[in-house]
Amino acid sequence: MRDRFRRPEVPSWLGSMLLHAVALVALAVAMRYAPQRGTTAERSAEVGIALKHTDGQTEYFESETDAGEAEASSSDSLSPNELLAEVVSDTSVQDPSSLLPKAAAAIGPGTIQGDGPLLPGAAHGAPPGAGGLGGKATVNVFGTQGSGNKFVYVFDRSLSMEGSGRSPLEVAKAEMIASLDSLGDTHQFQIVYYNEAPLPFNPSGQPGRLAFATEQNKERARRFIGSVTASGRTEHEAALKLAIRMQPDVIFFLTDANDPQLTGAQLYKIQRQAGGIQINAVEFGFGPEQGGDNFLKKLARQNGGQYAYRDITKFAPRPQN
């Protein structure tokens, strides 16, 4: 019975074969993972600090080199906008007001008015509304009013404007000069005296152009106004059309002539050509104003303007020298 359960013995030659087979397999594995001759694959030894991390129940080590490479990789993955935001967030912002000069002290008092840029006229204290900053001026002629930057005065100089006593022409001249004095040097103006033909003011040598209301041009205008005399008959339409072609904001039209009147067709053409230009009409009459709707009232009404009447018999006589 004892021989029956005896373990079989392994032959010695079989054991030797198994040992040699294991040795061959181990040698093959070692040769496969070993660096080949002639290559530059070499491992360099690095000395650093290894950091121990715990992630839950897992522990791992990280060297300073690995951490640096991870940080660089993270930076490389950021977009340019994200990098800029990161840089800006780490930069302290300096208050720019500390770098600016004190504007009021640097510029000085009285040189800036309002909110606009400094323009001619502001430095010498031009009054508000008189063009110190290129703003609109409000201009008056015998009670009619207009606001803007460009003005044309169309005044009758026909023979009937001579009159007797203190002539209507002289009164009209004084009113025009006072109106021009209210303009600042950034506003523009033109003067058209007329009888049967227009006579424009021409300071630049180029007729039909607006002039800036500088002191020099105002003085030239005074001389021109003083040289005008009353003569001839009256022709309204040509003078008005000349003024419209200059494209002002406001036209001041003054005449003493009830005849010849502008017809309805002429008034319509003037309104169409004016295209929104305000036209104020001043009538010089003999005696109290008559009722009714004459062409001057229609001219003003159709062009967004104002109408005024002046009785020439009420004009004060010329002062005696």
Image (tube, grey):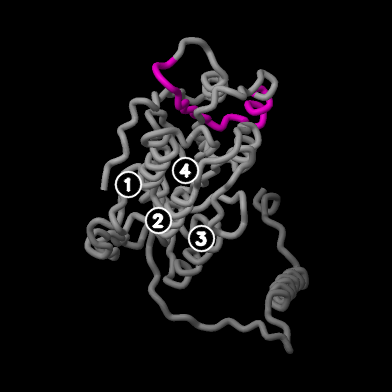
Span colored in magenta: 267-289
Q: Secondary structure at mark 2?
A: loop
Query: Which mark is in front, 3 or 2?
Result: 2
Marked residue nearer the N-terminal end (3 or 1): 3
Q: Amino acid at mark 4?
A: Asn
Quickly name the residue at label 3: 74
Dot 3, crowdedness within 10 Å: few (<14), some or many (≥20)?
few
Tell me where residue 294 appears, x and y as whole percent.
54, 16
- Mark 3 or mark 4, which has the lower sequence index? 3
Q: Residue at x 69, y 75 (%)?
A: 33
Describe the element under mark 3 as helix, strand or loop. helix
Out of 117 and 243, give the one closest to the viewer.
Answer: 243
Instruction: Check disc 1 and report the residue beneath it.
Output: 114
Q: Is residue 130 left or right of residue 321?
A: right
**Circle 2 Cα neighbour tier, 10 Å, few/some/many (<14 / 14–19 / ≥20):** some
> Closer to the observer: label 3 or label 4?
4
Q: What residue is pinned by disc 2?
A: 119
Q: CA distance from mark 4 to mark 1?
A: 17 Å
Question: How far is the residue under mark 4 from the one under mark 2?
Answer: 14 Å
Q: Nearer the viewer, residue 255 or 181?
A: 255
Q: Earlier in the sequence, mark 4 or mark 2?
A: 2
Real-space Cα separation, disc 3 to disc 1, in angstroms: 55 Å
